[in-house]
Structures are given as C-alpha cells and as structure tokens.
Image: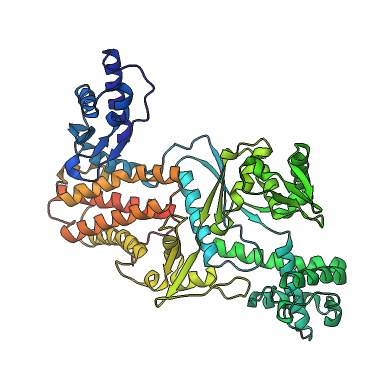
Amino acid sequence: MKLKPQLQALVSNALKRLVEENLLPEIDLPDINIDRTRQKEHGDFSCNIAMLLAKHVRCAPRDLAKLILDRLSAVGIVNKVELAGPGFINFFLTDEPLYQAIRDVISEGSEFGRTDIGVGQKVIVEFVSANPTGPLHVGHGRSAAYGDALARLLRAAGYQVCTEYYVNDAGRQMNILAVSVWLRYLELCGEEMDFPVNAYQGDYVWDIAASLHRSQGDALYRKISDVFVGVPPDEPLGGDRESHIDGLIERAQKLLADDYARVFDQGLNEITDNIRRDLVEFGVEFDRWFSERSLHNSGEMEKAIQTLESGGYLYEKDGAKWFRSTDFGDEKDRVIVRDNGQSTYFASDIAYHLDKLDRGFDRLIDVWGADHHGYVARVKAALQALNADRDRFEVLLVQFAVLYRGGKKLAMSTRSGEFVTLRELRSEVGNDAARFFYVMRKCEQHMDFDLDLARSRSSENPVYYVQYAHARICSVMVQLSEKKLKLANPADAKLELLTEQHEKDLMNELSRYPEVIEWAATNHEPHQIAYYLRELANGFHSYYNASQFLVEDKGLRDARLALIQATRQVLANGLGLLGVSAPESM
C-alpha cells in the first residue's frame, strides 16, 4: 500500500476545490511533499504545501493550511488531521496501513519494496574499471561494493541496468607494466640491474615474469647492457624517473619487435583474469567487459577526434592537438593528441562515452575514484561539443577507504607494491562485512575501515547486528518446530492483536521500506539501505528482548510470528540489495 500518493491525492483534490470556490487563483502547483514525521506527537505524515503556496496566493500559511484541511475528504486510512506550527498539515493514520504492510510483505516476498519509478529507462553503470596493472586493492573494493549495490538498487526501482567494466588495455601505464614484467623476466634469466623507480614493484610482477619465463624460456632474453643503451638516467642517478621509464619502453619495443606483444599481453591477461576472479568471488559480476583497444581497432577513436576537428573544436599548439574545453565550462583546454602522435586517455574517454550513447542508454553513470574529479568537466564538455546531452552523463566520486588495525592506519602505495589487496581484506573479514562496511557512508565521504570491528561478533559491528536479527528470527521458527506448534498461514493472522508499542514501531519500520528504496535509488545512495537495516534490526532486537513470541494464546502467537516473518523477509531483501547474505544461524 503506497500511502504517500493517497495523501498527495487528498491534498491535491482539496486545492482543486479551493480553486473551484474562487478562494485560490489558478496557478501551477508545485510538487506536493508528503513526509514522514520524526516525532509521533506530530502524526505519521506531514505536508508543507501551505507554506510553499502562501506567497504565490497572498495568504498566510496557517490560514491557507486551515482552508485545505477543511476540504480534505474522509479516507479510511486517515484517523485525524491537525494544523501545526507555521502551517504544517499533519496526518494521523489508523493502524490499517501497518497491518497492510505486513500482508504486502508476506504476499510479495522477495519482490516487496520494488518500485517502477525507473521503468522504460536504460541505464549503464560503469564502475571499478581499475587499470590492469596490478591486483585490486581495498580502494577498488569500495568502488566495487558501491557500484554493484547501486546497480541492484536501480534494478529494484525498475530501471533496465547494464553494468560494465572498462578495461584500460592501451596506453602508457600498460607499457610500464610490460617493461616491469620484462625486466623481472631478464632477472630470472640471470641478469642484474637497478630496477627502475617508476616501474611496478609488487610481487605480482615477479609472478607474471615467472609465467612468462616458463612459457617462453630464453626466447625473450636480451643482454641488459643492450637494454639500457641510450636510456636517460633514473632518479637515483640524478635523472628523471619519467624519462627513464619512457626510454626503457622505447628500447623494449625496439629490441623485442613483434615479441613485445607477448610480454604486454602476458601482463594484461594475467592481471585482468585475477581482477575478474576477485570480483566474482566478491559477488560482483559485470554484464560486459569493454576493451579500450577496441576503440582504436574499430576506428571509433579516430571518428570522435575527426568529429571534434570538423566542428572547429580542436587546434594545434606545440605539435599537439588541443580540445577547446574552456568553451564549455572547463577550467582549461585539454590535449587530445600528443606531440608524438599518440592519443590521450581523454580521447579514449570521449570515444567510449560516445559509444555508450550510441548503444541507446538514456543515462550514463560512471563510478570513479575521487582523484578523477578533474575529468568530469572535460568529458561533459566533449559530449556537448559532439551534440550529445551532457546531463545524461553523471559521475559519482568514491573516496578511498583507509584501513585501520589495532587503531593504526595501514600504509598503501600501488606503484611500490605496498598495499592491502581486496583478496586479503575478504580473507580477513569476509565478503559480508567488507560489502556492508563499504556502503555504510555516502560514496563521496572519506571512510575509515576498522578491521577489528568488522571481525567482531558484537552489537557494535553493524553487519553482525543486522544479520543476527535475521538469524534470531530463524531460531524462533526452529523453536516453533521443536515445540511441535502448528504454524498458521501468516496471511490469516489477526494483526489487530498487535497492540504493543514495540510491535507498532516495528510495523511502521517495515512499511517504510519501499519509500527507502525509492529515495535511495533516486539519489544513488545505497548507504540509506544500510542505515535502514540497522534501524529495522534495532527495532526487532528491542521487540525480541521485551516480548515472548511463542505464547499460549494461538491468535496472538500467530500474529507475532507473522510480524517477525515479515521482518525476516525485509531484512533478507535489504541485505540482498547490498550483496550481503542473510544467514539462518550465527
């Protein structure tokens, strides 16, 4: 039972009557907001329409609210209506909507709470998209948990959702990885060297090099003295780390010729396969993995650049091609093609997002790390220059998670190899705790991840607290069976016997669930589901500690069992949206 639309209709009809009675002029009505009240003495729902309209119709808010209130039609679910404060209209409902919410949960089961606000809209959610230059770390884990929960939430709201991982399998970072692997391979062949400062240092590079050595033997061996010929000195020798690694890339490509692709693909494929496996084990599966190289091979990259050029949006400076990004609100113009003829990551981004629009998606949602905030304006500018609707593109920025163990912050650096992988995190705290903790805050807020808390089995651990509520209800049903008490059909329960405040509070919380989904999906805030589940679990635990469920009175027993069964269902539904399990025992 959707309560807000019914109350909105009541207020709307009252306003129409006022217009018909010439007590109000005909105006375009703003949205009629019906909100749940925070304090029970103010009723169940409140409407502020009188305060929104007062200035336009030249009437004091309280006077207007009184006019509206006097013309509200009688509806069975409304017990009384009161005028409050500067002009609020407060609705006090009967208990019937609470009972109906329980019936709805029981009849709809896993579908309860789903809405249709997104029906007819195709949305693509691209998230994680970490460069395949190393394993996923805990920062990527937050993007994975958030992006997947958002996709689940949007589907629950009726949107047609496609999830996508953009594989950056072209460009300089991949070449740095290839050189890092090849140099470790040469070390396995017996060569010694000062490993480049700007190369990838992690143990995983050794693992890839070992795989390469097993499959290729010494076929890719070159003398180290030949490798460093003409390469600028590295930083420890007074040189520049960037020039040094770029020189090594150039030498590797020249010395290996066609075999360079073997090294490049070895690193790319092993890391991409590991990333895919990590995500699947984390409960995150993508509808599509999109290759950046496909944009080059298909000609889509060149097409996007030519379209910008023919529109007069590119110019040449210092041998490079620049996009007039400032014409569309960006803080400065951006390079599209470097002076060496290579296209930039930005050029790939333009072609990729144009491809998304060409595939017919109504909305493009990208989940990026907060360090990419500077890219938002330039991509929107490029889409506008290509005659696309920039407002169809939305970026959600996710702050990195900071790990704490024993009250101490854990260091993390991807290039140096000093980081905690997502796999290590999952091994330590489990998937459920990791996913729940990751989405407990707004994505743009910094997050401190307390490993000790995530492992604890206490009420202070939010995921344990919520899952324990579900398990407790399951234990009640086991006790019912052990006592050989007959379980009645919950749909036939006499819910009017539920008169205790704990029971009404719990029913009220259950009735909120569809509204929470709609709000969370509209605002892209999965953390609202986590907050809601904690409130629901708290309501149940309070009820559990205050009341007996398996009482002698069969009617009351059946009613209470129906209520906690509905609670169990909503807990499972909400946890499912976050990709978290609902255990039957703990």
Decide which of 119, 378 is in the foreground and name it: 378
Residue 131 visible at all: yes
Quadrant housing the C terminus: bottom left
Above-or-below relation of 13 to 218: above
Q: Is residue 185 above or below residue 67?
A: below
Image point (38%, 55%), residue name? 530
Residue at 25% in and 38% down: 45
Image point (79%, 72%), residue name: 248
Front in this rendered view, residue 383 or 525: 383
Position of residue 370 in the picture relative to residue 243 (left or right): left
**Residue most toward the left?**
553
The quadrant in which residue 550 appears is: bottom left
Asked if residue 168 lies left or right of residue 396, the reply is right
Of 148 and 368, the residue lying toward us: 368
Coordinates of residue 48 in the picture (x, y in percent): 28, 33
x, y (%) of residue 378? 63, 47
**Is 159 situated above or below 245?**
above
Residue 113: x %, y % from top left: 37, 43
Q: Is 510 displayed left or right of 334 in the figure?
A: left
Q: Nearer the viewer, residue 186 or 227?
A: 227
Residue 506, percent across and down? Answer: 24, 50
Quadrant of the rendered structure where residue 537 is? bottom left
Question: Seen in the image, is 144 located left or right of residue 429?
Answer: right
Point out the image quarter for the N terminus: top left
